């Protein structure tokens, strides 16, 4: 079939398998160009199919020749219907890893469930014995508690006061005002339940009990802080409470792992175009302004550049892992530089529909958004008939 992008709001309903494969190849080539990283050799990535999780898997495999297991929850393709982009990304990754002589297997299912945790543990025991790095990079709006069966939904709301500020429709470039009513206590609790650190802890506890973590294991989860302009709806809102819980969980996990000298960290990453961030009011406007500034300063990074730098300069530099006063790794350091944020504030104050094309990088935002779904890559013939039914070898064989 000929696959074109079909948009509905902040999501694309289609994905292009060859475009996703090109995206994966581009990321692999970037990692290989930066040289070898002396790091983990057996890696589990929970949430491995897109964004920072996919970049972590690629960096582990092609930066250090690591064997990787990836866990994700993606929709398979069917005749006349494309898969989700994460499915195609994972299929492409496995193909490239296998061609390079690297071990790579994947598990598709609900990572919050006990069943998928057990399936993953069984695969580690069978093929790898133990793992020395566990990346936790899940991004889901809902979570079913495996013990009670209760389904929890997260919300994106401010706490205490109504939030009103400017936003942009990144498809049209039209700016408008958005208002979000404050949350209640139940919504805070539900959001923490979905996006906090509880499930990360459950994974580590189950893996430790099963004996599949090496002595000195490292585990890492990803977070975001962001600028003042997004604080009310993000870091000081319901999502921020969940991130606070995630960051506090890192200390609990380190304590849980102390008898095997394991350590847990949260890495605070840069603001980037993702499916999740595109749904957050004010974030597309902020990122379009941020991109313009950081590109002009030669500081811009996408997911793969961020994670490659995180692994090479922070996790496996040979030195003590540097952290801030809250024991977080700050790979958002370039985004949060004072000169960058001061320029963002100035542009935010004057941003309008009329001048956004000039003062922001909306074109770059849209390009990155299309790239998430495999569209807009050089070297891909988007007018050609394409086989949408692509299989992931370790899942479909």
Image (spheres, rainbow, N blue to C red):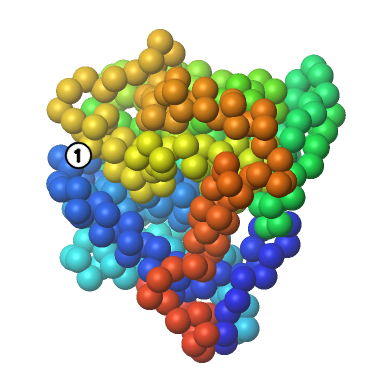
Residue drawn at 27 percent across, 54 percent down: 30
- The front one of 111 and 236 is 236
Counting from the top left corner in percent of width and height, residue 348 is at 64, 31
The image shows residue 297 at horizontal and vertical percentages of 38, 36
Residue 226 seen in the figure: no
- Residue 189 image-quadrant placement: top right
Between residues 288 and 149, which one lies in front from this camera angle? Answer: 288
Q: From the viewer's perspective, is residue 177 above or below residue 278?
A: above
- Image location of residue 124, percent across then percent down: 32, 50
Q: What residue is shown at x 57% (from left), y 41% (from top)?
A: 359
Residue indicated by mark 1:
39
In the image, 118 versus 134, the foreground residue is 134
Q: On the rendered image, what quadrant is the C terminus found in?
A: bottom left
Judge by depth and name the residue closer to the eye, 214 or 365: 365
**Which element type, helix, strand or loop, lies under badge 1?**
loop
Q: Residue furthest top?
A: 325
The reply to whether residue 367 is visible in this rendering is yes
Q: Quadrant of the N terminus?
A: bottom right
Q: Residue drawn 21% across and 20% down? A: 320
| Rendered view: 129 above or below 264 | below
Q: Position of residue 118 (x, y in %)?
A: 45, 48
Query: Residue at left 68%, top 57%?
Result: 171
Residue 280, picture quadrant: top right
């Amino acid at each position: 079939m000929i696959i074109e992008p079909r948009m509905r709001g902040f999501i694309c309903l289609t994905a292009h398998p060859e475009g996703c494969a090109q995206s994966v190849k581009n990321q692999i080539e970037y990692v290989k160009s930066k040289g070898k990283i002396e790091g983990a050799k057996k890696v589990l990535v929970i949430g491995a199919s897109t964004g920072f999780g996919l970049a972590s898997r690629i960096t582990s495999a092609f930066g250090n020749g690591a064997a990787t297991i990836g866990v994700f929850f993606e929709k398979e393709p069917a005749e006349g219907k494309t898969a989700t982009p994460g499915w195609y990304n994972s299929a492409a990754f496995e193909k490239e890893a296998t061609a390079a002589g690297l071990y790579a297997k994947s598990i598709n299912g609900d990572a919050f469930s006990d069943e998928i945790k057990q399936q993953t543990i069984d695969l580690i025991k069978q093929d790898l014995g133990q793992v020395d790095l566990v990346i936790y990079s899940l991004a889901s709006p809902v979570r079913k508690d495996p013990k009670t069966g209760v389904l929890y939904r997260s919300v994106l709301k401010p706490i205490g006061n109504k939030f009103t500020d400017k936003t942009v429709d990144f498809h049209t470039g039209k700016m408008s005002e958005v208002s979000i009513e404050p949350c209640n206590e139940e919504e805070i609790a539900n959001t923490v339940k979905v996006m906090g650190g509880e499930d990360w802890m459950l994974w580590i506890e189950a893996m430790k009990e099963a004996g599949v973590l090496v002595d000195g294991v490292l585990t890492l989860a990803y977070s975001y802080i962001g600028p003042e302009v997004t604080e009310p709806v993000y870091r000081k809102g319901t999502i921020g409470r969940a991130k606070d819980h995630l960051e506090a969980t890192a200390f609990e996990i380190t304590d849980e792992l102390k008898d095997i000298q394991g350590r847990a960290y949260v890495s605070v990453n840069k603001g980037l175009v993702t499916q999740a961030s595109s749904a957050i009011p004010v974030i597309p406007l902020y990122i379009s302004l941020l991109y313009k500034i950081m590109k002009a300063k030669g500081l811009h990074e996408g997911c793969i550049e961020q994670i490659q730098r995180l692994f090479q300069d922070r996790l496996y530099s040979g030195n003590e892992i540097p952290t801030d006063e809250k024991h977080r790794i700050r790979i958002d350091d370039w985004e949060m530089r004072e000169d960058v944020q001061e320029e963002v504030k100035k542009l935010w104050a004057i941003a309008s529909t009329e001048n956004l094309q000039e003062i922001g990088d909306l074109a770059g935002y849209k390009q990155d958004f299309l790239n998430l779904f495999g569209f807009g890559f050089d070297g891909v013939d988007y007018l050609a008939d394409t086989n949408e039914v692509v299989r992931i070898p370790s899942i479909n064989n």
